[in-house]
Amino acid sequence: MRKFLVVLDDSRECLNAMRFAALRAARTGGEVQILSIVRPEEFQGWIGVGDVMRAEARERIEVHFEVFAKWMRDRQGLNPELVIREGEPVEEILAQIDADPEIAVLVLGAGSDGNNPGPIVTQLVRNSGSLPVPITIVPGEMNRDRLETISRG
């Protein structure tokens, strides 16, 4: 099964990337895998405190994921998969692609802050010639109607 991997984070552009991945997967008979990455420095300090913070981060991610998952189930007939990894974002994205051979496309949202598409997009585009899958970069400012029109192709 062909999977569209999309990164879940707190950015505004994440919404367009989620929509695009879901629309393309629904139209092509694919699936959506949603990856959320927690940076390890968020848990520095005492071991017990780090464990509590890790559990709270996981809970926030699952609540955030469920909003997108409900929309995908209700509107697109998809049941997305959630994967949570801990580490540096680019390294973990590549590790997830390596771990799941069904991932066929990485979908990222580009930031709308002038000339800065965001750190993940910037780092991955620099190395795009050696990536194991194609990247689709969805503009953060693209409106829903245009996004739906483009995803039909």
Image (tube, grey):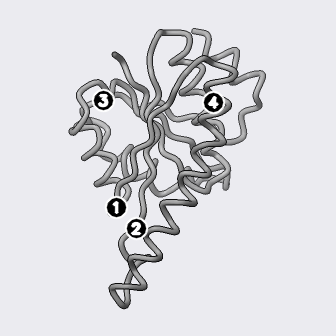
Gap between marks 2 and 3, in whole Å?
24 Å
The x, y position of residue 34, in whole percent, is: 47, 39
- C-alpha span from label 4 to label 1: 24 Å
Q: Position of residue 130 (x, y in %)?
A: 22, 37
Q: Which mark is residue 8?
A: none
- The residue under the point 42% across, 34% down is 5
Q: CA distance from mark 3 to mark 1?
A: 21 Å
Q: Which residue is mark 1?
A: 86
Q: Secondary structure at mark 1?
A: strand
Residue depicted at 55% across the width and 10% down the height:
27
On the rendered structure, is 102 left or right of 150?
left
Badge 2: few (under 14), some or many (20 or more) residues near its Cα, within 10 Å?
A: few
Mark 4, other Cα within 10 Å: few <14 / some 14–19 / many ≥20: many
- The answer to whether residue 122 is above or below residue 148 is below
Quadrant where the C terminus is found in the figure:
top right
Q: Which numbered dot is residue 19?
A: 4
* Numbered circle sitting on residue 133: 3
* Residue under numbered circle 2: 39
Question: Mark 3 or 1 closer to N-term?
Answer: 1
Q: Which residue type carries mark 3?
A: Val
